[in-house]
Amino acid sequence: MNRITMLKRLVCFTVCVLSAGLAKAQEVDTLLHEADSLFSAGKLIEALAVHEKILTFNPACYEANVYIGCYYYLKGQEKLSEIDKAYKAIQTPNRMQLAHYQDQLKSVYQDFYSRADGYVRKALSVRKNDQMQQIISTIDAFRVRIGLAVPLSKKKRT
């Protein structure tokens, strides 16, 4: 194969790669607009699905990671509020009720906060944001509260 043929193939390959990247970027942009429309219409679960689809094209998409992270964080906050309210309504909880409450707290972490954590951390790796950092701090504090992590002040220093 001569140099001209190799150069032509290289140029063709480069154009194909750049075109594919441009097509992905356009697809992500279209999906972001669709997700915004769904969110504005109050269709939060549908917007969540579109944001998840965006991440298949671009796993580092800041907007999609923020939306999904916040979605799971806020759902966790709602569930936590329900659980805390029900537990506080018990005047003198027995051991079984306390154990059930603790199990429910762990399920909030597993079902919502652990999911939110990954997406929010990914968003923070793309762009720093005080609100996202506050969510991480809240999740970390909750992890300590339910016994899944040790408070920083109690960790052994080496």
Image: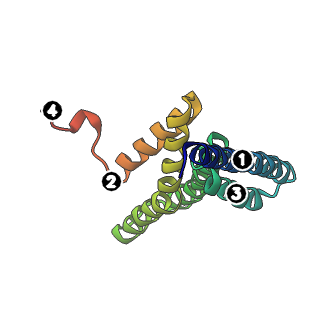
Badge 4 element: loop
Depth-wise, is mark 2 or mark 4 nearer the camera? 4
**Comparing marks 4 and 3, which lies closer to the viewer?**
3
Residue 157 is labelled as 4
Judging by the rendered image, the residue that carries numbered circle 2 is 148
Give the mark nearer the N terminus: 4 vs 3.
3
Mark 3 is on which residue type?
Answer: Leu
Q: Which mark is residue 48?
A: 3
Residue placed most toward the observer, 103 or 56: 56
Q: Is the residue under label 1 in contact with that under label 4 (CB below 8 Å)?
A: no
Looking at marks 3 and 1 on the same chain, the residue that comes earlier in the sequence is marked by 1
Q: Position of residue 68 (x, y in %)?
A: 63, 51
Q: Which label sits on residue 113?
A: none
Q: Nearer the viewer, residue 145 or 64?
A: 64
Badge 4: how crowded within 10 Å, few (<14), some, or many (20+)? few
Check if mark 3's residue and mark 2's residue have beta carbons within 8 Å.
no
Neighbourhood count class around disc 1 (C-alpha, 10 Å): few under 14, some 14–19, many 20 upward: few
* Kind of residue at disc 1: Ser
Residue at x 15% of width, y 32% of height: 157
Q: Secondary structure at mark 3?
A: helix
